[in-house]
Amino acid sequence: MNQLLSERILNMATSATLAMAAKARELKGQGKDIIGLSLGEPDFNTPDFIKEAAKQAIDDNYNSYTPVDGYAELKKAIIDKFHRDNHLHYTAAQIVVSTGAKQCLANVALVLLDKGDEVILPCPYWVSYADIVKLSEGVPVEVKTSIDTDFKMTATQLESAITPKTKMVWFSSPCNPSGSVYSKQELRALADVLKKYPNIYVVSDEIYEHINYGTGHASMAQFKDMYERTITVNGVSKAFAMTGWRIGYLGAPETIARACNKMQGQITSGANCIAQRAVIKALEAPPSKVQYMIDEFKIRRDLMLNLLSEIEGFSCNIPEGAFYVFPDISSLFGKTFKGKKIANASDLSLFLLEEALVATVTGDAFGNPNCIRISYAASQTQITEAVTRIKRALEG
Ligand code: PMP
Ligand code: GLU
């Protein structure tokens, strides 16, 4: 019998974050008291001023197909945002609005990669990068980092990963899952390497830009010599608590933006009309409007780090941004808890789900098999309860 499904889908991994969230939801549905710290999504409501704009858009009869690359007013708000927050100057022809930053990333991979082109991914990287690259027939090239370098790729590591087939470098800062933030100097050091390789492009995923507890955000495209070679990806899911609204956007050299527009025109068309109208208001607002969420995330980060420091075998970097901790738990490998042997990070993540009723994600999904990812986008009560349960499960 002929195989029904394509090699393409058979070779693709299921998104580990979404799979774990689905599993946690299923167990919850069976009446289990699961604390879900697997999915990276803010637990806040979308701010009222954004919700009002969406209601208004419905009443104003925004119901038609939108321009494929986004409403002109939204593109203007994005141009102004890039200018205000990142000192980046884009024209409307360089902006594409998509159904989430995930679609921006897929568009970029599909329009830039040919079979066998290599994409350098500093590990740990966000779960979908490798599979989006593979879907586009590219080859992910992992650059291993560890907790000792705050999970950041150095210039030397970048240079040694480059081959004649390297087409792009993809990374997120603040990083999902490590929370690491590249400083301007660190980005400059990477750019200095890339200066020697003018055909390599950079995808700078800045979706956690505002969720930053440290010294501030730097964008790769801010460097004049990188501007023409950088695709800046961003979105409203995280900073504005709008994960389900599905709006992301990118700023890129015009040729690349036009190609993304063409790709999107054959696959999904323009993003949702009501959500786009609401996002205009979100992006026009000063970032201070959502600072209350960032302040709360910082309190939760500190709480999470404090509580985890009491558990033997959990070794954490201090995440400067995003809302995850990424403890190295490799010292637990080979040990047995409650009769279950923990051989690797997946075993631990499953053990914590079954024995502590806490959902986390294995580090394998992010290219680092020594770690697990725990989201702290949950209430302080839930965080405290979750870590107490983890501690108890690993005690006896
Ligand atoms: N990039 C990173 C680093 C993320 O964590 C996410 C979260 N899903 C995305 C991109 C995609 O975001 P969205 O599609 O919700 O805009
Ligand atoms: N970015 C989130 C995460 O990493 C959302 C889930 C997803 O889109 O994979 O958990």
Image (cartoon, rainbow, N blue to C red):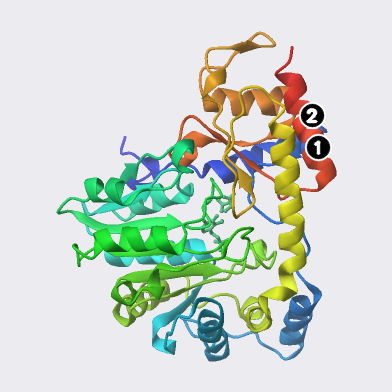
Side of 338 where 226 appears, left or right: left
| Residue at the (54%, 75%) spot, across then down | 271
Three-letter amino acid code of the residue under disc 1: Thr
Closest to the observer: 225 or 362? Answer: 225
Visible residue check, residue 389: yes
Side of 270 where 60 appears, left or right: right
| Residue at the (54%, 46%) spot, across then down | 177
Q: Which residue is mark 1?
A: 384
In 3D space, how far apart are the residues under numbered discs 2 and 1 (Cα atoms)? 6 Å
- Crowd rating for badge 1 (residues with CA inside 10 Å; few <14, some 14–19, many 20+): some
Residue 248, compared with residue 30, is above or below; it is below
Residue 182, position in %: x, y? Answer: 46, 57
Q: Quadrant of ligand 1?
A: bottom right
SS under mark 1? helix
Closest to the observer: 386 or 70? Answer: 386
| Residue at the (27%, 62%) spot, across then down | 192
Residue 108, position in %: x, y? Answer: 36, 66
Q: Which residue appears farthest toward the top when viewing the image? A: 339
Side of 168 where 338 appears, left or right: right
Residue 267, position in %: x, y? Answer: 42, 69
SS under mark 2? helix
Side of 90 where 61 appears, left or right: right
Q: Which mark is residue 388?
A: 2
Image quarter in which the C terminus is found? top right
- For the residues bearing labels 2 and 1, Cβ distance under 8 angstroms: yes
Image quarter in which the N terminus is found? top left
Picture mark count: 2
Closest to the observer: 300 or 170? Answer: 300
Closest to the observer: 245 or 349? Answer: 349
